[in-house]
Image (cartoon, rainbow, N blue to C red):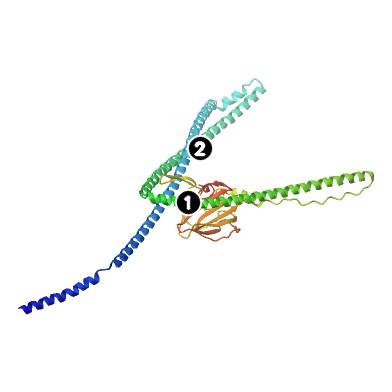
Amino acid sequence: MRRLLVLAMMLVICLAVPAQRRNQQRRPTQKEQLQERQRRLRQQQQQNRQRQQQLEQQVRQRMKDVEALGSEIDDKQMLIDSLHVEMDTLNSTIARLDSQLVVLKNELEERRQHYVQSVRYMYRNRNAQHQAMFVFSAQNLNQMYRRMRFMNEYTTYQRAQGEAVKQKGEQVAAKLDELNAARSELAALVTKGEQEQRLLEAKKGEQQRLVANLQREQQTVKKLIAQQQREEAEVTRQIDRIIAEELEKARKAEEERQRQLAEQRRREQEQAAAANANAGSNNRRNSRRRNGSATPATPATPTYRDADPDRQLTGSFAGNKGRLPVPITGSYRVIRNFGPYTMAGVTLQSNGIQLEGQAGAQARCVFDGEVSRIFNSGNSFVVMVRHGRYISVYSNLASASVSMGQKVKTNQILGTVGANHVLMFRLQNWDKLLNPKAWLSRLSR
């Protein structure tokens, strides 16, 4: 019995020792615990950064959607306002047509009355015997002639009255058709205006929902707006500096051109004075001679008539207002208009427009000109093209396919739009900002 107990105890000890050793092997050291904790913290930080990047990307997209809806709302409001103007014009036209129709109807009734009276008179005197008696009962030939002439003229008058009644009736019918067409057009405009108003309300509701979502991420929105403002302010500073340099260069070029013109005028005046003096001397010599030879003509001096290329290009560019091509290839949407706009309760200023295109979209030149500057701003390129006094600016390009000083043509590719597919386009008349929508063909309507 004792031997069995000893064996059982030994068996228990043998089983417990490996288990204890395994437990000791599984227990990590303090260093290993710290390393594992650091690994988990790094993993959590990475996940937090990824979540923050995803959140910022979502917020950026919502901000673009809000701006695009704001642009659509502005366009819808302008369309509705123009429809109201057209409705007012049509109402005035309808009122004018109504008054004209009343006048025409009165004239038609008056002519009908005259015509009826003439028909009744002719009916009463329709008998040829009565007409003959009327003519032959004249007291003399002169009176007989006048009566015959009266009968002929009255017959002609009656026909003219019939034609006048017919023409006036046609005028009344035409005016009535014109009035009905104007009323139909007005009804169509009213229907279109109501539809556009419903679309406008729907867009406003969608925008409000997006703004409410953005307000829940207000800190992220403020951060992104501040970052956007810094980037745009830096680009604006560089553009303003470059334009100031261009202005100074143009001013000096104009001063030199005016100096050359003044110098040329001075030489022409001196040559003209010398020619006059020579002509006077020759005239005096010729007066002392009976048969003098003709004075040779003074050779003409070429004058400074070189046209200013900047002025020519400026006039050509200005003449194409409202017909310039959109500066991005493929389909697009306007996500920011020119002028002040509001984002998450903050009022901001846009110096141009922003167009969101498709993947691989490219920026294209809106008119013939010369690439005046290419510079890097952050992670993107900016291309500036001069069209005389006018300057077009293409920002947020991933790459530029032109070089500084290169002559470019309308629709020529300038570069590829950045990864977010948004092209920032700005238009200026020297240092005066212009609204690009008034100059681009598909946006000016």
Given this view, does label 2 or label 1 mark the residue nearer the observer? Answer: 1
Q: Quadrant of residue 366?
A: bottom right
Identify residue for label 2: 174
Q: Position of residue 264 (x, y in %)?
A: 75, 49
Q: Secondary structure at mark 2?
A: helix
Tell me if I can see residue 328 in this picture. no
Identify residue for label 1: 230
Q: Given the current orientation, which residue lies at the most extreme bottom position?
A: 3
Above or below: residue 372 compared with residue 347: below
Q: Of residues 314 and 159, which is closer to you in this image?
A: 314
Q: Given the current orientation, which residue lies at the most extreme left position?
A: 1
Above or below: residue 273 compared with residue 47: above
| Structural distance between the alpha carbons of marks 2 and 1 | 65 Å
Q: Position of residue 151 (x, y in %)?
A: 60, 27
- What residue appears at the point 51 percent right and 54 percent down from the top-left corner? 395
Q: Position of residue 288 (x, y in %)?
A: 94, 44
Q: Secondary structure at mark 1?
A: helix
Tell me if I can see residue 35 in this picture. yes
Q: Earlier in the sequence, mark 2 or mark 1?
A: 2
Question: The N terminus appears in which quarter of the rendering?
Answer: bottom left
Look at label 2 and name its amino acid. Answer: Ala
Look at label 1 and name its amino acid. Answer: Arg
Query: Quick one: label 1, few (<14), some, or many (20+) residues within 10 Å?
Result: few
Q: Of residues 173 and 429, which is closer to you in this image?
A: 429
